[in-house]
Amino acid sequence: MRHTASFTVAVVSMIILLGTAGCGGDDDDGGPVEPPDSDVSLVVAGGGDNVPDRYTSDLWVHGNYAYSGTWGGAFRNGNAGNALKIWALDPVGAPSLADSIITPDIGTVSDVEVSSDGEVLMFSAEHGASQGLYLYGLADPSAPTLLDSVHVEAGLHTATFGEIAARRYAFAAKNQPDPALKIFDVTDPGAIELAATVPIPPNYGIHDTYVRDGLAFVFAWNSGVIIYDVGNGIRAGSPTDPREVSRLVTDDNGIAGSPAVHNGWWFHNPVTGEARYLFIGQEGPGVVGGNASGDIHVVDVSDLLHPVEVAGFRLQGAGAHNFWMDEARQILYAAYYNGGVVALDVSGTLSGDLSDRLIDRIEPGGAGNTYTWGVQLANGFIYASDMLSGLWQIAVEESSASRTD
């Protein structure tokens, strides 16, 4: 859930292209129900400044352990991004480095995820002779053991699990040339099998995939978001025979680069019972350790056959990256590169400019030491992976009077 295009690493003067984003909602459909309470704050609780050897990429937390990848678009202290970091969480949730897995002949550990049952660790890899998909067993979560791997020419930018019809699949984003959604059957994690390959237009290609309720939302950069039936039934699709439901290219909002549809989250609101909104991140140009650009777009998918962009959020001088949601509390958490971590109130009807929905924002590493890649809500905390300053534990603090739904 997931990641970056080509970047500029300020620290090493290497130019990088991020993405661009914008939102083109109109204001005729309601708007915020109530402004969010201001007495909710994000506060550093632990971790940070703990990966000096490499740039940090994605993260996943499960139980008392966390796992984070490393990015190798530029070397840091002479090291490529070939390390998966293993973190033990202490009784109050603070991370400490327990071990690392070094994979030869790759340049980036680009995406990390643990299966819902906690038994399998998956990561995707790019750049090098061994790029592809890796599965590890977590019988001992402090010492993962390799179960199987598959080489994918050009590498995989992201990979996410999806459980459909009692089988487990990995939905992976194959890089250019010939970009594609690659679907692997990983029900037996010791024997990865290719289930399907879906070509994606080489308009940059595919960046990330979100799978829920038998639908795969493919975030395909300038080709927009493409929705596939992979077991939902709306188009009689399956993981071995994905069938397109619809697609939408979001607005570029005047940000240089293009629509740059990067990632997303389909919000299932337990308060309203609706699955109305798809949040999309747009990754614009930026400089690692410097600035970034790109907005959050909100798409109404209540009619899956005809998605419509309705709202958006912009943080000036910063750019959206990966998301996580606290659906029960109707809060979207977004990694925002140099903007750190953003919390947005997404309750009620969403329309137009959502700038007044900002609850709080934190730069965990401080100015000049924050470039946040990913976030995850786990064990009551937000965990954030930061390219510059490593893995952070962030507390969500609020008064008893705040956010009464």
Image: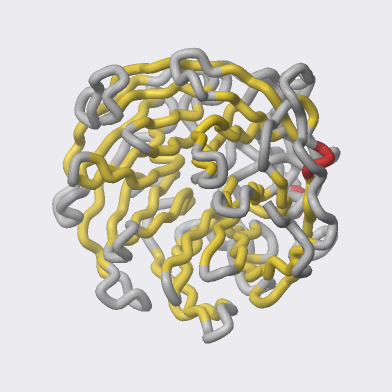
Residue 141 figure quarter: bottom left
Taking the image as shown, residue 292 lies to the left or right of residue 302, namely right
Name above or below for residue 145 compared with residue 352: below
Taking the image as shown, residue 129 lies to the left or right of residue 261, namely left
Which residue occupies 61% across, 70% down? 51
- Depth check: give the residue in front, 120 or 40: 40
- Depth check: give the residue in front, 305 or 206: 305
Residue 12 in sight here: no
Residue 181 figure quarter: top left
Name above or below for residue 218 compared with residue 367: above
- Depth check: give the residue in front, 391 or 281: 281
Which residue occupies 75% across, 35% down? 313
- Residue 49, given in percent of the width and then of the height, sits at 68, 72
Which residue occupies 20% across, 36% down? 194
- Depth check: give the residue in front, 50 or 189: 189
Residue 153 in sight here: yes
- Residue 15, given in percent of the width and then of the height, sits at 71, 39
- Residue 174, given in percent of the width and then of the height, sits at 39, 33
Which residue occupies 64% across, 57% down? 387
**Figure label count:** 0
- Residue 310, given in percent of the width and then of the height, sits at 67, 22
Scheme by which the image is coloured? secondary structure
Taking the image as shown, residue 311 lies to the left or right of residue 278, namely right
